[in-house]
Image (cartoon, rainbow, N blue to C red):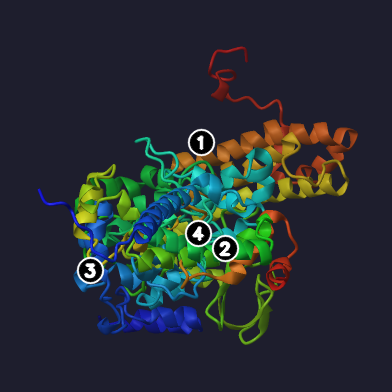
């Protein structure tokens, strides 16, 4: 397709580095460049013949797939070298049960490279250290396999006898650590063995994990105008199309994929799902995030408050190794990418004003609740008024739910236009929690010192001054002026 | 009626020798049959402590507890059918006795497990060389129904050129990978973890005879 010169050139002026280079590639799904002589493994037919009987559903899904049409068979994905940790012999062939992103990346190179280092691929690594304090202590390790790891991914353990440890497998969590060292699971979103394009474009592809109290993105999307349009105009979504560029191949409604990964106008698709997110929304305090792209292909998210490294400098990765910074995408640039999607359907002023409304909610959450609550908790820990162990004191649940559940819901609700989640399920509960649970519990924990602590972090803020006007009448509770109540 | 006349070389002594030899031969065959029967029994096989580890996994397998009430003994699977073949297998089996007496301490569960893979590979080769003959003593390909309808079809249509053991290994005893994918190091670490031993103990134990 022909690039739109003016917009592209304008963007090129705005920034440098890999992020913008990626904007210059055509906005179609990446084509497999591997020569077809590399697939259609001769042993594949025998697999199919038997599996049509042994697991007919699975075989039928493959028969209906684009893989089958292209001649990609079971062995092309499942073949393994005997030396691989999870290799096993099966009917005369050496195979691995797990098809890792690295395996898929043999053909789907671009998607693999984009996905590695993404917030999805790092989903396990991000919470690995924290899991014991919640899942193990609060409940028990059994919950890790059926809870946390189902979405975040397990560290798949191959036992000494070659079998996969059932505590870690089956698992298709998106940040799964595979026996071959690669991170992620393509089948998390691309249901095996059909690997349907349409299925991955549906919002349902994300629902298994992006639902529930801490990230109710399914519920938010459904409650938004976007979701309403999608539900009523699904038949116009062109979901089966080979190329699926928003504004060109479909205009009825966006899905999760559209905004977070999809091609839109001149914006190319990406399998780095967090690339277009300017904010962190699932943290105690939201921060604008830089995306640091390293020369080995990996990426690091860095909050704007951190010392963001320059191009060419060396940074230490989470695993301790050093890598050179190839490029840095600042939050503004990431927001720009998202905005390009919006602008396929909305005007610039409209889009910018919406982003402002969203940013205002995040700022409000941060300044009024997130930052003070965090500072108060830090002081309680510093003074030894709370034990360092999380969740052994009621206030720790209160604080956790304030930012992790209610606070995240409110921020997500504002980002994706569900008024219910922004307010009733979100910021209303944040406010109720803060004033009716959190502060009273601070008073219980800190006793005589409580008032000083609260005053230090809350009292000075204009946002909390309404508490000092107890005489102000309002009819909202059914009392007061105009309601004929006691007032 | 003509009198039955024996050839001249059948003298009285020859006749006695023949009767004694014949009876001795029958006795010997009866002995072999009884001997093979006894040495194929679970009681005999698990007489050595080292074999009780294999017995544990066997006793939790369907070959020990089958709904049909049929119970396969050690010998049913691991000793060939027919008195000569069975005897030969037992003669060859004396190497196990020799190793039990003069080899590593197979009675020790750690040593036993460390050596298990080689034993499993050997047993699989034994089945393969005989085209899974002992499986076929009981299992008839055409009669295999299975619990699922597909099981019968698969056994009729997908087994050409294959022997039972090609697919059905790790059926009765503890899981051991195929020889080509076996990783000694990973196996050793598993054994150490299972018995709470320090890393490297397995290698040291394998070196000591």
Whether discs 2 and 1 lie on one chain: the answer is no
Q: How many marks?
A: 4
Q: Are marks 1 and 4 in contact (CB under 8 Å)?
A: no
Tell me the SS state at disc 1: helix
Q: Are marks 4 and 2 in contact (CB under 8 Å)?
A: no
Which is more N-terminal, label 1 or label 3? Answer: 3
Q: Where does residue A70 sit, x and y in percent of width and height?
A: 22, 73
Q: CA distance from mark 2 to mark 1?
A: 75 Å
Label 4 Cα neighbours within 10 Å, binned few <14 / some 14-19 / many ≥20: some
Whether discs 3 and 1 lie on one chain: the answer is yes
Circle 4 residue: A163
Which is more N-terminal, label 4 or label 1? Answer: 4
Q: Where does residue A117 sit, x and y in percent of width and height?
A: 53, 70
Whether discs 4 and 3 lie on one chain: the answer is yes
Mark in front: 3 vs 1: 3
Residue A233 appears in the figure: no
Which is more N-terminal, label 3 or label 4? Answer: 3
Whether discs 2 and 3 lie on one chain: the answer is no
Circle 2 residue: B96
Label 2 Cα neighbours within 10 Å, binned few <14 / some 14-19 / many ≥20: few
- Asked if A345 appears above or below B180 in the picture, the reply is above
Mark in front: 2 vs 3: 2
Mark in front: 2 vs 1: 2
Q: Are marks 3 and 1 in contact (CB under 8 Å)?
A: no
Tell me the SS state at disc 4: loop
Tell me the SS state at disc 3: helix
Label 1 Cα neighbours within 10 Å, binned few <14 / some 14-19 / many ≥20: some
Circle 1 residue: A424
- Residue A328 tag number: none
Image point 50% across, 75% down: which residue? A83
């Amino acid at each position: 397709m022909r690039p739109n010169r003016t917009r592209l050139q304008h963007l090129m002026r705005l920034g440098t580095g890999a992020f913008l280079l990626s904007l210059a590639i055509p906005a179609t799904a990446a084509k497999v460049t591997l020569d077809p002589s590399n697939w259609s493994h001769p042993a594949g037919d025998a697999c199919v013949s038997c599996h049509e009987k042994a697991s007919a559903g699975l075989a039928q899904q493959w028969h209906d797939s684009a893989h089958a049409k292209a001649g990609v068979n079971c062995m092309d994905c499942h073949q393994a070298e005997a030396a691989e940790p999870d290799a096993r012999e099966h009917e005369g062939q050496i195979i691995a049960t797990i098809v890792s992103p690295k395996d898929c990346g043999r053909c789907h190179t671009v998607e693999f490279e984009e996905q590695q280092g993404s917030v999805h691929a790092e989903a396990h690594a991000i919470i690995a250290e924290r899991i014991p304090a919640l899942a193990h202590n609060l409940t028990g390790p059994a919950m890790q396999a059926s809870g946390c790891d189902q979405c975040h991914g397990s560290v798949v353990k191959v036992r000494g006898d070659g079998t996969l440890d059932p505590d870690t497998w089956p698992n298709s969590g998106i940040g799964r650590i595979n026996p071959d060292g690669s991170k992620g699971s393509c089948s998390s979103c691309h249901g095996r063995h059909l690997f349907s394009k349409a299925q991955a474009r549906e919002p349902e592809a994300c629902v298994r994990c992006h639902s529930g109290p801490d990230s109710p993105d399914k519920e938010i999307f459904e409650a938004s105008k976007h979701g309403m349009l999608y539900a009523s105009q699904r038949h116009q979504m062109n979901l089966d199309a080979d190329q699926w560029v928003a504004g060109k191949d479909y205009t009825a409604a966006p899905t999760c994929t559209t905004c977070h990964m999809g091609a839109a106008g001149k914006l190319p698709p990406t399998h780095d799902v967090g690339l277009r997110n300017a904010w962190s929304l699932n943290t105690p305090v939201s921060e604008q995030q830089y995306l640091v792209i390293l020369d080995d292909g990996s990426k690091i998210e860095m909050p704007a408050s951190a010392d963001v490294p320059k191009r060419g400098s060396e940074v230490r990765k989470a695993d301790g190794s050093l890598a050179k910074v190839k490029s840095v995408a600042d939050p503004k640039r990431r927001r720009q990418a998202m905005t390009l999607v919006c602008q396929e359907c909305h005007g610039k002023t409209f889009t910018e004003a919406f982003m402002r409304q969203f940013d205002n909610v995040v700022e409000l959450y941060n300044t009024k609740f997130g930052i003070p609550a965090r500072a108060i908790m830090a002081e309680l820990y510093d003074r030894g008024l709370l034990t360092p162990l999380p969740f052994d004191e009621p206030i720790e649940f209160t604080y956790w739910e304030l930012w992790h559940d209610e606070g995240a819901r409110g921020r997500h609700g504002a980002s994706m236009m569900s008024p219910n989640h922004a307010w009733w399920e979100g910021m209303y509960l944040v406010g109720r929690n803060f004033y009716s649970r959190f502060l009273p519990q601070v008073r219980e924990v800190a006793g005589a010192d409580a008032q000083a602590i609260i005053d230090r972090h809350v009292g000075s803020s204009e946002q909390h001054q309404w508490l000092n006007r107890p005489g102000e009448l309002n009819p909202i509770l059914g009392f007061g002026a105009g309601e004929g109540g006691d007032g | 009626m003509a009198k039955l006349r024996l050839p001249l070389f059948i003298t009285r002594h020859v006749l006695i020798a023949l009767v004694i030899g014949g009876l001795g031969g029958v006795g010997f065959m009866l002995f072999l049959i009884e001997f093979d029967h006894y040495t194929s029994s679970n009681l005999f096989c698990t007489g050595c402590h080292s074999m009780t580890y294999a017995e544990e996994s066997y006793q939790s397998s369907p070959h020990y507890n089958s709904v049909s009430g049929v119970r396969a003994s050690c010998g049913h699977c691991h000793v060939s059918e027919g008195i000569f073949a069975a005897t030969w297998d037992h003669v060859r089996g004396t190497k196990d006795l020799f190793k039990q007496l003069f080899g590593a301490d197979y009675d020790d569960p750690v040593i036993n497990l460390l050596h298990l893979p080689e034993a499993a590979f050997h047993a699989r080769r034994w089945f393969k060389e005989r085209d899974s003959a002992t499986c076929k003593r009981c299992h008839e390909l055409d009669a295999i129904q299975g619990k699922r309808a597909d099981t019968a079809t698969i056994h009729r249509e997908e087994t050409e050129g294959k022997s039972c053991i090609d697919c059905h290994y790790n059926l009765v005893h503890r899981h051991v990978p195929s020889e080509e994918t076996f990783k000694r190091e990973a196996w050793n670490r598993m054994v150490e973890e299972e018995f709470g031993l320090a890393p490297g103990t397995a290698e040291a134990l394998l070196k000591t005879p």
